[in-house]
Image: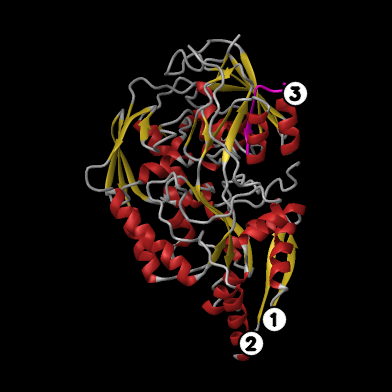
Amino acid sequence: MICKRRYLATGIATAAALLLSSCGGGGGTDTTASKGASGKPVVGGAATVLTPSDSQTLDPARMGNNFASGGIVGNALYGTLLVDAPSSGKIRPSMAESFDTKDGGKTFELKLRDGLKFTDGNPLDAAAVKYNWDRMRKPATASPYLSDASMVASTKALDDTTLLVTMAQPVAQFAQSVVTSSLNWIASPAALKKGAKSFDSKPVGAGPYTLKEWRRQSSMQLTKNPKYWDSPKPYLDSLTLRVSLDSAQRINTMTSGGADLAIETNMQNLQKAKEAGLPTNALPLSGGTYLALNTRKAPFNDVRARAAVAAAIDMNSLNDSVFEGDASPVTTLFDKSSPLYADIPASSPDKTEAQRLFDELAKDGKRVSFTFTTTSATENRALGEAFQAQLSKFDNVSVKIKVVDFSEFLTLQTTHHFDAAVTSAAFRDPEPRLWTAFHSDEPTNMSGVADKKLDAALLTGRTATSVEDRKAAYEQVQKRLTALHPMLWIIRTGGGAIAKKNVGGMTQYGFSSLLPEELWVKK
């Protein structure tokens, strides 16, 4: 089957930084890695990589650090301060030697490697990191990671390689925000100060590659940075990133040998690749896409209306009707691979209870009528129609579908002019995604849920330092979300990569962001 649902929505919950795949987690599909080329990495050669989106800017503060929108570009041009281990999620140093807290997350000390330099010859020092991080905290910069950057109250360069970071409130897991955002990418302050047009034509970082040519909406040519700090990486002499928006086209190109590697948003494509004998890689994610119910106004300012819709929708049936059974409905908030996993059901369909609540609301003069707002993409409208079809089987509830263009859809986060809309909170570690999605003070809280117990549990999860305490806190988060019904979890999302058999070094970190310096081709 060709995946017809190319992209379900943008991740408004992460300020549009994340482009989501509606094809999700592949149902029962096995997406574990299958190995490519083995042995000692080969230095030299070139590779072509298919990407599922085109970069709109090369300003690292405004790029998305994830598998679907900008991850490989940012990693190539700017390198990484930190990465995490694919299996455990444990933070590991890269251009930073360490990023430690000794006071439970009140302050952090970032220690850089000696001798780091941008390609313009300027030092990548503590002052450069300070400039980039302080710039991200300014709303005028328009960073999609403003919420992440705003967790920092102040920064101070103690010496050339040491940055003191003082947090607005203790966040013991702040390193997770670094590896899953563009805080991980540092550009030359001198180049940034020349303005956006100049920087996009000649971005300056300290990453494994430099920009040779950028043809917007088509391709990007990258060449090896001979002064990259981690020699002999990058192994390849050059890298071509080619935009390939269509999932069917990507898998066809890979199986016919038309590219060396593809960044993949479609889990079914990963399965097809494995069946064709091609190496694959994917990282499991928790959370996923969800339908935000706007609690700020009727009908969803009444918890009974939210509970009724939650009880009426059968996600397995929705999976069959919209995704042909190929997606993975979110059954629990955390994936089983997470140390924070708890067997707390994300939804419990109950048609009898749903009808009882719809009838009760109608009797009280609050008949449930709402609009499902979506974009003009066929696949997005199909999801709205599936919700509409399921709810049409009940009395005293009606659903309309409103189709808006993409730019208007993105404004919903600030205008709140919607009743129900699909967004995302997908993550490896819940910090900071659950906070930004559901804390009452966050502008990215699409549903508008405001609950003291939920806020308290999120705060405990954010500030706790042990796995046990964090797990207990997030169990409370799950219970409050279940009780309040501000949203309905839909499907898992995931990101992976497909390669030719002679390609080695497929390595992802954070939000499935691919590390280009690790790639090599066996001759």
Which residue corresponds to mark 2? 362
Tag 1 near tag 2, CB within 8 Å: yes
Q: Amino acid at mark 3?
A: Ser
Residue 289 vs residue 168, the one in the foreground: 289
Q: Is residue 110 visible?
A: no
In this image, 492 relative to 339: left or right? right
Q: What is the x, y in percent for residue 181?
A: 48, 42
> Which badge, 1 or 3, is on the more N-terminal residue?
3
Residue 35: x and y in percent read 54, 23
Element type where label 3 sits in the image: loop
Hey, what amino acid is under mark 2? Ala
Q: Are marks 1 and 3 in contact (CB under 8 Å)?
A: no
Q: Pointer 1: what residue?
A: 395
Question: 257 or 76: which is nearer to us?
Answer: 257
Q: Mark 2: which secondary structure?
A: helix
State whether residue 92 is above or below residue 421: above
